[in-house]
């Protein structure tokens, strides 16, 4: 040990913070994870679709493209190794009319560039042979897409971190940090037992609080803190039998992948998330939004009965763009971005952050100049 209280402190015990801590733990750094809530995974990581994304859509050369594909491969291997449940059920991206067929071709080409395995273009008949209740003019099959038990995944990460000597401090909000003269960080945590500790490295993975936490780091350049945007997504549950065995997605909408069909590991079907920019964290699902859901879902499932949708849950995406603006990449900001040695700050870790989490952890370790284990 090097004279610091900890070799590394990670802020945030969502899927991404835990995966970062796991990447550091694998390199023998025994990280301490500070989490403001009393449980792991109480933020964005517990309010999403739990979909393991193939990585089809993301722009060539982007972090999203690379980290989603490598993260997905690593995630399936991790889930296998730790006995965490998943269903590699596959996904259909459907053109709901002839005009959308070109979009499928563009997505297929992007998926090829992104090196997504096993993609296939399906005719209408081939798609209906797989999912007879569909309405579509054609489809893409992504066999690597699936759903998983994201909470089981976070528990397994937590177990790995503790096994290697790391620790989780719950109810310990990060209050700020200052660089130490000879390198490293003095980190302040609040809560019932406030503490100050020194750490050689600091990783900020606080989800929706990314901007707030970065602003609490002495010397973090204000012009390197991107403005936050909250992209709320609501879900409606289906009463009755699940109509499809695969995930079903129409082509993406501006700013998000859009309302899709998902069946969770328990066989429960739901639709969501839509996209609504909001000013505050508010997780109520407005029943009035159901009307838009019926119209949208019937484009690909005309058999949706009246009255079958009930408001379910909502999540909020930590976005880096507002309505109508292009959707930017993940930001994994190391010293090259903000000039502070031993610090990595994450911004805009929206979808596919869950799928990418293990790869984000590896990327963070790389930005901290740590060798592969
Ligand atoms: C509606 C929706 C659907 C999505 N669907 C998918 C999907 O199907 N597949 C996919 O791959 N991705 C999906 N995503 C994205 C994915 O959920 C996120 O990218 C991922 O969960 C982000 O994890 P995180 O650890 O960065 O954030 P979080 O899970 O929010 O974790 C951050 C943690 O930091 C803590 N924290 C905040 N401030 C402090 C502080 N000052 N001190 C200490 N702790 C602090 C918070 O309490 C929280 O626990 C979806 C997102 C949304 C909103």
Image: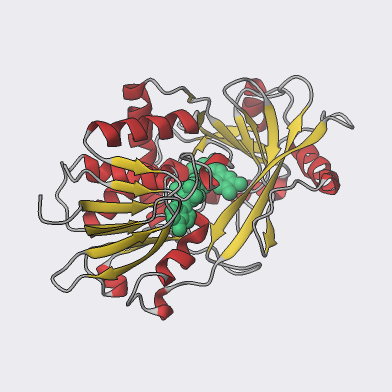
Image spot of residue 369 (x, y percent): 17, 58
Q: Residue at x 48, y 25 (%)?
A: 88
Q: Residue at x 64, y 56 (%)?
A: 281
Q: Which quadrant of the rendered structure holds the C terminus?
A: top left
Q: Quadrant of residue 230?
A: bottom right
The reply to whether residue 55 is in sight is: no
Image spot of residue 163 (x, y percent): 25, 31
Q: Residue at x 76, y 39 (%)?
A: 297
- In this view, 100 is above or below 77: below
Q: For this view, does 328 lie left or right of residue 334?
A: right
Residue found farthest to the right: 306
Q: Quadrant of residue 136?
A: top right
The reply to whether residue 123 is in sight is: yes
- In this view, 295 is above or below 177: above
Viewer-closest of 71 and 236: 236
Q: Residue at x 67, y 65 (%)?
A: 279
Image spot of residue 296 (x, y percent): 77, 44
């Amino acid at each position: 040990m090097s004279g610091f209280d900890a070799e590394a402190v990670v802020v945030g015990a969502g899927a991404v913070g835990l995966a970062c801590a796991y990447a550091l733990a694998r390199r023998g750094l025994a990280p301490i994870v500070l989490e403001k809530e009393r449980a792991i995974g109480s933020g964005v990581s517990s309010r999403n679709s739990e979909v393991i994304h193939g990585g089809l859509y993301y722009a060539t050369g982007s972090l999203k493209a690379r980290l989603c594909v490598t993260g997905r491969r690593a995630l399936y291997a991790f889930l296998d190794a730790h006995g965490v449940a998943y269903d590699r059920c596959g996904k259909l991206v459907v053109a709901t009319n002839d005009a959308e067929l070109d979009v499928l071709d563009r997505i297929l080409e992007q998926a090829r560039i992104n090196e997504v395995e096993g993609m296939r273009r399906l005719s209408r008949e081939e798609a209906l042979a797989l999912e007879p209740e569909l309405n579509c003019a054609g489809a893409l099959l992504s066999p690597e897409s699936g759903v998983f038990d994201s909470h089981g995944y976070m528990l397994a990460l937590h177990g790995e971190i503790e096994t290697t000597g790391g620790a989780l401090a719950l109810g310990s909000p990060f209050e700020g940090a200052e660089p130490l003269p000879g390198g490293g960080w003095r980190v302040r945590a609040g809560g019932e037992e406030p503490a100050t500790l020194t750490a050689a490295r600091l990783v900020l993975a606080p989800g929706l609080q990314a901007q707030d936490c970065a602003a609490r780091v002495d010397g973090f350049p204000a012009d390197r803190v991107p403005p936050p945007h909250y992209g709320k997504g609501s879900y409606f549950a289906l009463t009755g039998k699940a109509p499809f065995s695969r995930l079903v997605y129409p082509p993406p909408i501006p700013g998000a992948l859009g309302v899709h069909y998902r069946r969770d590991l328990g066989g429960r079907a739901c639709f969501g998330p839509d996209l609504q920019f909001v000013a505050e964290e508010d997780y109520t699902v407005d029943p009035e939004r159901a009307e838009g859901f019926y119209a949208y879902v019937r484009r690909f499932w005309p058999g949706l009965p009246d009255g079958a949708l009930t408001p379910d849950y909502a999540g909020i995406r930590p976005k880096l763009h507002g309505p109508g603006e292009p959707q930017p990449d993940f930001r994994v900001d190391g010293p090259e971005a903000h000039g502070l040695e031993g610090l990595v700050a994450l911004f805009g870790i929206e979808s596919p952050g869950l799928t990418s989490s293990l790869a984000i952890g590896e990327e963070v370790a790389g930005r901290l100049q740590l060798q592969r284990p």
